[in-house]
Image (tube, grey):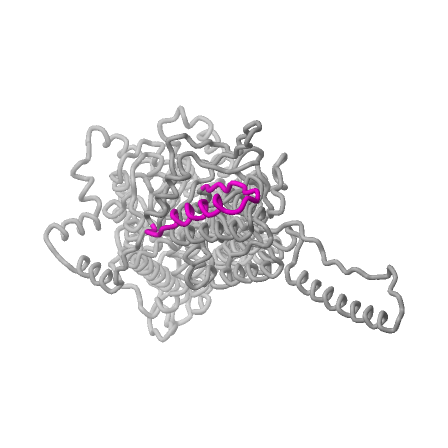
Amino acid sequence: MKRLYADRINKEAEQEVCRLTENPLLRWQDDLLQRRNHSSNRPQKKTEFNLQYGVLVASQTESCAPEELCYCVLIRNLLWNYHSYFVPSEQIREINTGRMERPLEATRMEKNTSCFLMERKTRVKTSRKEIVLAKLRKSCSCSPRKLKNFVMDFLPVLRWLPKYQCKEYIWGDVMSGLVIGIILVPQAIAYSLLAGLKPIYSLYTSFFANIIYFLMGTSRHVSVGIFSLISLMVGQVVDRELILAGFDLNDDAPPVLGDGSLQSDSQSNTTVFNLTAGGMNAECGKECYAIGIATALTFVAGIYQVLMGVFRLGFVSMYLSESVLDGFATGASLTILTAQVKYLIGIKIPRSQGHGMLVITWFNIFRNISQANICDVITSAICIVVLVTAKELGDRYKHKLKFPLPTELVVIVVATLVSHYGNLNEVYGSSVSGAIPTGFIAPEVPRFNLMLRVAVDALPLAVVSFVFTVSLSEMCAKKYAYTIRANQEMFAVGFCNIIPSFFHSFATSAALAKTLVKTSTGCQTQVSGVISAMVVLLVLLFLAPLFYSLQKCVLACIIIVSLRGALRKFRDVPARYHANKVDTVVWVVTMAASALVSTEVGLLVGIVFSMICIIVRTQRPRTALLGQIQDTSFYEDDLEYENLSSIPKVKIFRFEAPLYYANRNYFLKSLYRLTGLDPNLEAARRKKYEKKEKQHLKKEDHTTANGLGGGDTTLQLVPKQIDFQTLIVDCSSISFLDTTGVNTLKEILKDYKELNISVLLACCNPAVIDSLKRGGYFGKDFGSMQEMLFYSIHNAVQFAQDFQKLPEDCSV
């Protein structure tokens, strides 16, 4: 006869349990044995006691009286209810008495091991009011040391600059600063086309952003300044507001004076236009109003970022997954590419606004393709070939080059000289950048009336700017083994928007391409940002007028070539699809919405769609019936693995998601489908069988009373045979339960109990156990908790098997 035992736990463990519970149960056991040994001369069989699953279990070598065995089971339940004393499944062996010993577990118990007590820690309840007051006292208290730490945390430059190792860092910082400055100047001038502003404002933005991030940033390598995606978002808001204010978006349209006369481009900065918009009476021209919209948008975005830092809302960036960000960047790149095509071929079409801008713009391009400027087409073709070739060579031989080739600057210088001495604007009508003033314009406070108009548009701008900056900062910090403070990064980006908005600048962010160049040219600290700002300052003070004859098609070529990285994402779609199909769908949906509708709507669609995908995954998760891995105490999916053995009379069901209101029905349907038994239908079927049986017996009795023989025509109605007596629910993948989830488990417990099927729970985490307790799953006093809840599937299986061996007439 097989029996379960654990070394050194029989008598000693029983005595220990009795000592802990302070109940004379051991004496009850001895009395029972003595009473049985001095009973009548009828054959008596020996009853053995073992501590199993934390309870005292009685087993017989042959048979015993039912009332005596019930008494033993009563002792077992009392011990179980007093203490959760159990032996782990890894410490139990199965012995075949008088036969060959067969190991059942993957790990055997050593002889010197013993059972242990599993207790939950008592949580110390603390008043939330006291916690809040303590935090307020700590935050509001002021001391010289705390004030010093606050200032140094707010301006990290005060911590690292005094420790600056000049001999070791200065060369790399100067070289990377010069290279970034040289790259930054042509890009700033080019990206002004995206923002719908004059090039001078892009140079202001690049200058102030580098200085402020040098003071407040925590990343050593990030390059903050003009970013194509942010410039596009600013430009879309500026164009919309210009249209609403009644301005013409045609870049080459001559400005209009108050008397209706035209004014030359050289005097466009002083154009006066009587404008009433949003309750604001102002004399302001197109350029003035455009930069007013941009600065108001930038100021509000910076305020949002600072508030997010104050209230610790950096977690918002977690909802922008990598697929959403990549799809958003790729869709915006298509929009940027579309917006620059008209400059490439030199046609004059209205700048499209609103949803579907990409489709409308391409329609207008093909409709006006016959008006293409041959000079611009040839110039664009030459510039793109030169830029792409230089970029490809630079990527191929970057390990041999100490710093990247300043191709953009060379192209701009050469193209400017050719345009100036060839009179391309006068002879061929090629569009040029125009006058770029030198020096700084007097600072001006952003207009509050305009802030109200762009408050909604500033929110996605603030989130995207922050997310790109923090992502690049974390990437660099991980690569070069240092840490950043995400909350301080939010403050830094916020003030990179707030302060420059007073100096006619627009929104900024970290840029991937310039950051990679910065790291590859030996950058060590943000001193390189100061060097880049000095290069921009040199252009602002002395060199800006030299770019008057620079063709706009050259700037468009620089923008389009800079989009190579984002457009190459299309090549990664097959690999992305192979890695994760859902993420690929999120990428495609976000990209399509950003390109075909608008960038703001695309970002929102991407976030919402990715959340829907997560909800759908939890609504229809994987479910499985488990089988036992042979000769082990482990269980796995029966459909995924071979050579798994099923447990007789036991079904093990796994649900791989939280159980809550949205997936309750799927949980029940999967359970009924995999077990092959719907308890509600089976209960109804049995009632129907019983009703028919009663009708048949009544009819048979009536026939017999009338003297008619029933013969062998008796109809025997048999309900469906159930192939299991215990259902074990593997809760290892259920992270939480809501009220609906608890009620669902209570429902299946009740329904299966009507069919004499036990429901056991295994591998529940503490949060799930607490939810079950609060929901009344184990009863009011938790008396049956130890017979319904197990720490492993194997313990539940062993309990179910031993419970099935008890005589049917023995009940407790």
316 lies left or right of 345 = left
Query: Is 423 contained in the magenta span?
Result: no
Check the image and name the residue furthest to the left: 144
* Start-end of magenta stretch: 21-50
Q: Place residue 459 in its image quadrant.
A: bottom left
Check the image and report above or below for 142 versus 414: below
Check the image and name the residue furthest to the right: 708
Q: Quadrant of the N terminus?
A: top right
Q: How many marks?
A: 0
Q: In the image shown, does 147 or 742 lie closer to the viewer? A: 742
Q: In the image shown, does 4 or 598 lie closer to the viewer? A: 4
Check the image and report above or below for 739 versus 722: below
Query: Is 33 contained in the magenta span?
Result: yes
Q: Does residue 436 appear anywhere in the picture?
A: no
Query: Residue at (30%, 54%) from the top-left corner?
Result: 122
Check the image and name the residue furthest to the top: 400
Residue 432: x and y in percent read 43, 49
Residue 242: x and y in percent read 43, 65
Residue 56: x and y in percent read 45, 46
Q: In the image shown, does 532 or 48 lie closer to the viewer? A: 48
Q: Does residue 701 appear anywhere in the picture?
A: yes
Residue 742: x and y in percent read 49, 61
Query: Residue at (19%, 58%) from the top-left corner?
Result: 139
Check the image and report above or below for 38 versus 136: above
Q: In the image shown, does 63 or 762 lie closer to the viewer? A: 63
Check the image and name the residue furthest to the front: 41
Query: Residue at (72%, 66%) from the top-left corner?
Result: 690
